Image (spheres, rainbow, N blue to C red):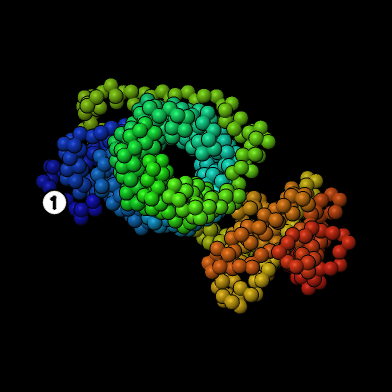
Amino acid sequence: MPFRTGPATPRPWFRPLARGAALCLLLALPTFAQAPQQQPDPQATERLLAFQSDAAPWLETLATAARGERGRVRLAVANARFARATRSPAGEEWLRLAADTARRGAYHPERVGALSALSDDAYRRGDMAAVIAIENEALADARRYGDRREIGSSLYGLGMADMAEGRLDQAEARYREAIAIWREEGRERQIAFAERALGRVFETRGQYAEAVEMQVNALETMLRIGRPIEQSESYYTLAKLFLNLEDHEAALEGINQSLALIGDTPPDFPLGLNLILRAQARLSLGDHDAALVDAENAMAAFRRAGGDLGPALGSLSLGRAQFALGRQEEGLATLREGRALAAKLNERLLDSDLALAEGESLVAMGRPAEALAPLNQAYAIGEGLQLDRLRQDVSLELEKAYSALGRTAEALAASKQAYAFRTKLSRFDQLGQLAAGNGSARARFMALEPAPAPAPAPEAREVAQAGSNPLPTWIWALALPTLLLAWGLVRVLRHTYRLRDEKRQIAARQQALETEHQALRERVALDPLTGALTRQAFATELSALLAHAENHGRSVALLVFDLDNFKTINDQHGHLAGDEALRLATGIARGKLRSDDLLGRFGGDEFLVACEGLDQAAAEALAEQLRFDLVWRAPDATPPMPGLSLSVGVAVADLGKGYDAGDLFHRADTALFRAKRAGRNRVVGDDPAHAGDADSRRARQWNDALAEP
């Protein structure tokens, strides 16, 4: 719904009255858009949309006269809110117009708001390509203006899209970068959001101890500073995690707390999500009748909310509940309807869950031959997204199906396959850690005070009591004097606003120049291929880290490693493949390091890692994780890199060995030399008996880096 070029020329006496009416509508649009969620009357909605269309020329004239381009932006935002409140498809057109107009006028806050709303809409309809494009657009803007808060927000949005597409490593990297930025900015609420998302990454990988710890941390922050809806979201996420861990007591506690926090008149979509989760918990506990009621209520809420994503999500719980109550054909049909919606939305993870449920149902119904197709489709999605837990669960069902069909060899192969994935998953080790630690994170969760149900806001009660007449009569009696006064103030303040806008634009340009200078300094300090610190920058940071550790009596571990068989990969596949090998190694290292740890490139295929607070044993354990992950992932890289591995040397600076940077590097480099001489693909620790074995050339290069200003 674009702006019109201008109104037809009215009679002179009509112009002030029309402008007054336009201003009244402009002021009212956000109010209509923020009204409580309810089903609008179709005829009333049609009349309002027609009135909005007729008034658009006057609104544009008034907005431009009052605030220039910024007025056009705010008008577009108001129209977008109005369109979304009336469920008109024009909402996204207005938001895009607002974003583009704000870009031309350099109105960064307004553009941020419009792009954020566009991204939210794209995410809700499952269009991840649009989410990525919009968030990258917002990220470029935020970096140009030096807006670190919005840089973090865009990284978080990109992480959400990566998570939905199954790119877990990339999602984790984006979340960690956003957390680091928000921690510097002191933004606890945003950190809690990112920790909650990072917990979902851990959960998908099967790292359940880390996932529970991260989610409980986020919940505790939200209960302290968050709004009820944010607290509800945290309870919901934890409940889902506990349900996956088959901890039904904790799952139901989380779901009930989440439902209590969203209030008596909750938004339909969050209500539906909570109800389908409670239905799953009740199914696991054998309370099939209550599970069916929850699933049916969830589907009703999703249909009120509109769109296909909700019904696709709800069909999983509803189909399983129907099947559990003996309505097998009905349940199977529900699951298949959900799969059709998931395929339409390109929701691959949801499609895999529904396909697995369909296969399980067919096996239970004694139709194993029909079950093979959906089970193999679910397995293919698991292969594409590298989801070990999904592949394990599908393999177990395939074993049942093949056994029922008498295909013994294939059943045995599926069983071995399931066992292989089970050994790769860390679920059982993580559950053991939870038990060994007395479930500290779970215990903290269960000890939290129940959340009080939020009381309806006074404004909401007044609107509910007013019924179909939300604006009292006395408001209309004051409308004309108020409009005349507002018009006079607009004319007086217009010049002031223009001066303020010019001042903001000058400040924005100055900020952009400072950001460019900062980016230039960062480019000098970072290796352009891997993003790791250069040798000189790493040496500078390590010296500062050692000084800090010495003042506080803490240890600092230094890992020096290089890639085994790197030259062979370069010779066989070319230098681009070599570059990918370097990026793979640094990506794995970033995934294992904390935000305060250092990662640098010494040169070629040689890298350095420094971590404060690790002793020799912990540092060697970290090195083993890096080595194992690279060996495990290299054959599946693009191109495949079989034989790629790490040799790592480890040394520690502490009160006993001193904090000299040159000595620390020499000891770690000597250990690396011994690892390579012993056959490569291993971790070797510092040993004073071999103090003279290191490469003197590398020692000179390190000393030169320390000496450079």
Estimate the x, y position of residue 28 in percent, counting from the top left. 27, 36
Classed neighbour count for the residue bearing mark 1: other residues with Cα under 10 Å, few (<14), some (14–19), many (≥20): few
Residue at x 37%, y 36% (from the top left corner): 323
Q: Is residue 458 left or right of residue 222?
A: left
Residue at x 76%, y 70% (from the top left corner): 698
Observer able to see residue 336: yes
Q: Is residue 606 left or right of residue 291?
A: right
The residue furthest left is 11
- Residue 5 against residue 607 in the figure, above or below: above
- The residue type indicated by label 1 comes to Ala
The residue furthest top is 465
Which residue matches tag 1? 8
Q: Is residue 476 left or right of residue 232?
A: left
Observer able to see residue 520: no
Q: Is residue 202 left or right of residue 44?
A: right
Estimate the x, y position of residue 171 in percent, counting from the top left. 51, 52
Front-most of 661 and 302?
302
The residue furthest right is 689
Front-most of 564 and 425?
425
Residue at x 17%, y 43% (from the top left corner): 50
Front-most of 449 and 8?
449
| The C terminus lies in quadrant | bottom right
